[in-house]
Image: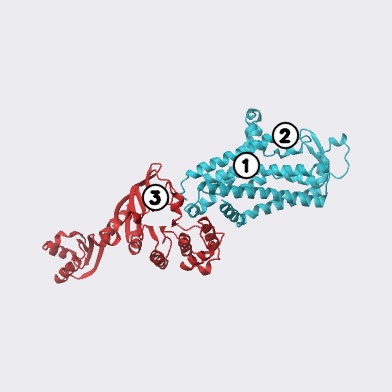
Chain colours: A cyan, B red
Amino acid sequence: MITLINIELYKIFKRSRTYIAFAAVFVIVVALQIGVHFEGQSTLDFLFQNIKESFMFQGDLVNGYLITFIILSSLWIHIPILVSMVTGDMISGEANGGTFRLLLTRPISRTKLVIAKFLAGWFYSILLVAFMALISLLPSLLIFGKGDLIVMKTTINFFSADDLLWRFIAAFGYGMLTMTTVASLSFMLSSFSDNSIGPIIGTISIIIAITIISSVGESLLRPVLPYMFTTYLTSWLLFFEFELNFTKIIQAISVELIYTLIFLTITLIYFRRKDILS
Amino acid sequence: MTNSELFIEIDGLCKSYKQIKAVDHLSFKVFEGDIYGFLGPNGAGKSTTIRMILSLITPDEGTVKLFGKDLAYNRYQTLSQIGSLIEKPDFYKYLSARENLEILGKISNVRHLKKKIDEVLELVGLFDRGNSKVKTYSQGMKQRLGIAQSILHDPKLIVLDEPANGLDPQGQKEMRELIHAINKEKGITILLSSHILNEVEMTANRMVIINKGKNVVEGHVQDLLNESDMNVSFFINDTHLAQQKIKESAWIDQLIEYDEYKLLFKLQHHQIAELNRFMVNSDFEINAIKPLRSLEDYFIKLTGDDHIN
């Protein structure tokens, strides 16, 4: 099993496509950092124009934490695309390239191969989020320094600088979990397909479609929304509530984990029986 | 042949795709040491059968026994002794030949892998290009790399599906020589699938012809080719007069048909010279004699002319 995982990781990191995702994250993050550096203060003035009459602000609100928070908010749709670019290709890419004929005529179990591929894809996904966390937090804090953060949700939350690092670590950790779910969805679609574009587009389409339908038909779908994995894609925001709602956090984590297991189980059942015609 | 020498035993194999029966109660046997030709026109069910032998496709009915063991219950054990090259040789194009072989060797638990890779690359004539990315390879080089990966783990049996596909005549000749070398020098039994009779004739010792998923004829290649009657065309200057002469002789029983250019006879091998003598003695000018063995004839009817040469 270890050999298979190593082989899958070797294949992932030998492809230039893999590094496109890291390059894309790097470019987007740097662009956001530059943008916030020049436009951050005026944006904040605009956003807080109403509450400035009620609160007194001291210090620099345009700081490393604010920039990281904006990056996190901005990238929740980009990262799933970048994750599915690799995980959506992991099974269908072998079918499309004809290399399943090489692999599956060897004495290996299909179950082990699927699990090895999934674990390699999962490793790539969390590495991508970790990379994003690293290049968001570290340079932002080094260049723009620490500072307090104001998060406006249904309530206005003020966080002091020394109460923020663990929240960001938790938020990125949660992001890794949601990207695992996204990876397992695109991985499942990849097992159904013999080309790589379908699973990548399919994953993003499913996420966007469910998100839009959930927003538009919220009153109608309210009973099922707590059970949809897309509902919790942005639940990293739960770590930016002054008092953590553990019930909601556990619910979000559970739903994401259950969907990951469901997608992986479907992949295993389907792929074990699949005729390799490519 | 004893039972222990039976390497492949296909019995009543069936596979359908929706309404289309790709393989229909197919049975044949391959023995140790054989180069076994698996011949049939395109769409006859060869690739589907081979994929079932290699457990890529699950049969609807029938059994595949490899080395005397049912594949369905002994997949790992049997596949570890089989190498294969199915249709076009596809590899990870972004990796070198060596890197591809390393991956496949690790999956097959090949010992002394680097040494083994050198050995197979040398055998197929790719040693100097081993570090080049596969995307830079020609079709012929990919085919040879396909053979290299199929023997990397020292299998007892290799299954080659149309290994000469896409190769020029020189490449086809080299491929035949390679197959012979693997069979003779390494003692590897080979199941060779092809839609080209000549390729099978020049390479295999035993063969089966299938069509529409069914076994049509099976046996030793030379027996099938030599023992059968031949359809022989005599191209002569005056077929009308010749026809009259033939009618007056015993050769009329062998005459199948004629036109303005040729007379077509069904003959035993030794009768060709006798009929030739008869024609010469009757003062006919023979332009050409074209033998067409009935197996070829039969195969042409199945497949069309383009599959003979």
Q: Secondary structure at mark 2?
A: helix
Foreground residue, B22 or B78? B78
The residue to which callout 3 is attached is B69
Q: Amino acid at mark 3?
A: Lys
Q: Quick check: B234 left or right of B250?
A: right
Look at the numbered discs 1 and 2 and tell me whether their residues touch, using CB distance below 8 Å. Answer: no
Residue lying at 67% horizontally and 50% vertically, measured from the top left: A127
Q: Amino acid at mark 1?
A: Thr
Q: Which corner quadrant of the image does residue B58 belong to?
A: top left
Same chain? Circles 1 and 2? yes
Disc 3 packing (10 Å; few <14; some 14–19; many ≥20): some
Q: Quick check: A70 left or right of A56?
A: left
In the rendered structure, the residue with mark 3 lies on which chain? Answer: B
N-term-proximal mark, 1 vs 2: 1
The residue to which callout 2 is attached is A246
Please state the horizontal and vertical placement of residue B28, each as a whole percent of the image.
Answer: 33, 52
The residue to which callout 1 is attached is A181
**Front tag of 2 and 3:** 3
* Placement of B201 over or under A248, stated as above or below: below
Please state the horizontal and vertical placement of residue B94, each as a whole percent of the image.
Answer: 57, 59
Look at the numbered discs 2 and 3 and tell me whether their residues touch, using CB distance below 8 Å. Answer: no
Same chain? Circles 1 and 3? no
Q: Quick check: A38 left or right of B56?
A: right
Whether residue A68 is visible: yes
Foreground residue, A201 or A166? A166
**Front tag of 1 and 2:** 2
Q: Secondary structure at mark 3?
A: strand
